[in-house]
Amino acid sequence: MKVIRVRDYSELSQRAATYFINKLTQSHFGVWGLATGGTPKGMYKELIIQAEEKGVSFQNLHTVNLDEYVGLQPNDPTSYHSYMQEHLFQAIDIPSENIHIPNGMASDLEKECDRYEEMIKGLEKIDIQLLGVGENGHIGFNEPGTSFDSRTHVIQLESSTREANARYFDRLGDVPTHAITMGIQTIMEASEVVLLASGKNKAKSLHALLCEKEVTEDIPATILKKHPHVTVIADEEALSLVLLTCERENEQVLKF
Ligand code: F6R
């Protein structure tokens, strides 16, 4: 696992965007797994700027998003469909048919999960999967206790996750109770994973990932220790516990 230590959120966003743009300029096509939430917003903003500067086209890119709330219309301003349009897709030249996000309004949610898995298989593989991490260690919306064998499925959101995301809704009661999320096994099958973490509230999750030996379903992000190609881009605050307690072991990766 490679850890790129950055000063702050602004540097994190720039480094992450450059990382993804470089992938695209190297191959001109591919499948990106994308995340939503607060963390990647800055990266998407930078991605748009850097793509424009470098004349990079997204015409041959396919994207598959990690998750979507159950029960929100795609055009609901708080849906992840709307989030992706607002923060990335409206500003780049990706064909709409290349964009894939779970349908949280499907009448048969189990069927929708199977369809999503089949769709990913049809794309062969996810070349690079972008992840954030929850304060409870979730990746995608795979909450603690989710099986490492899981594929795309419906999950009941933990109250801490709903509280963390309530800032995007008028009131806590409006935050959906369920979501469709790619499973942990689905995420692990991506050729490469890039995890972004910013802020003190991510320090415990990063400590579990980078300092503790245990790989446990109680902290889903710990499974990434078993993935052969992971890059963590994290700022000083997110790394604060790591720097305090296990800097020695991480000396090589944290000092660059
Ligand atoms: C979002 C997702 C979640 C978030 C995580 C962190 O698609 O899958 O795992 O990455 O909840 O969210 P933020 O970035 O808002 O702290």
Image (cartoon, rainbow, N blue to C red):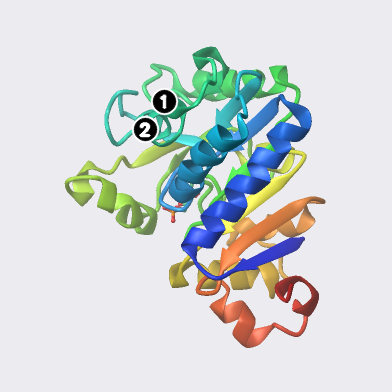
The one of 159 and 120 positioned closer to us in this rendering: 120
Residue 26 at least partly seen: yes
Q: Is residue 161 above or below residue 211?
A: above
Give residue 90's mark: 1
Foreground of the two, 105 or 62: 62
Which of these two is toward me, 220 or 5? 5
CB of residue at label 2: within 8 Å of ligand 1? no
Q: Residue at x 45, y 43 (%)?
A: 45
- The x, y position of residue 152, in whole percent, is 58, 32
Q: Which mark is residue 213?
A: none
**Position of residue 185 measured from the top left corner of the image (x, y, whole percent):** 69, 40
Label 2 crowding class (10 Å Cα cut-off): few <14, some 14-19, many 20+?
A: few
Badge count: 2
**Amino acid identity at mark 2:** Glu
Question: Which element is circle 2 on?
Answer: helix
Kindly report the distance in space between the C-alpha atoms of the residues bearing marks 2 and 1.
6 Å
Vertical position of residue 173 compared to residue 232: above or below? above
Q: Is residue 206 left or right of residue 92?
A: right
- Residue drawn at the location 45% of the way across and 33% of the way down: 88
- Asked whether disc 2 touches disc 1, contact meaning CB atoms under 8 Å apart, the reply is yes
Tell me the residue at 29%/36% (across/down): 78
Which one is in front, 62 or 113? 62
Q: Quadrant of residue 163?
A: bottom left
Q: Which residue is mark 2?
A: 86
In terms of image quadrants, where is residue 63?
Answer: top right
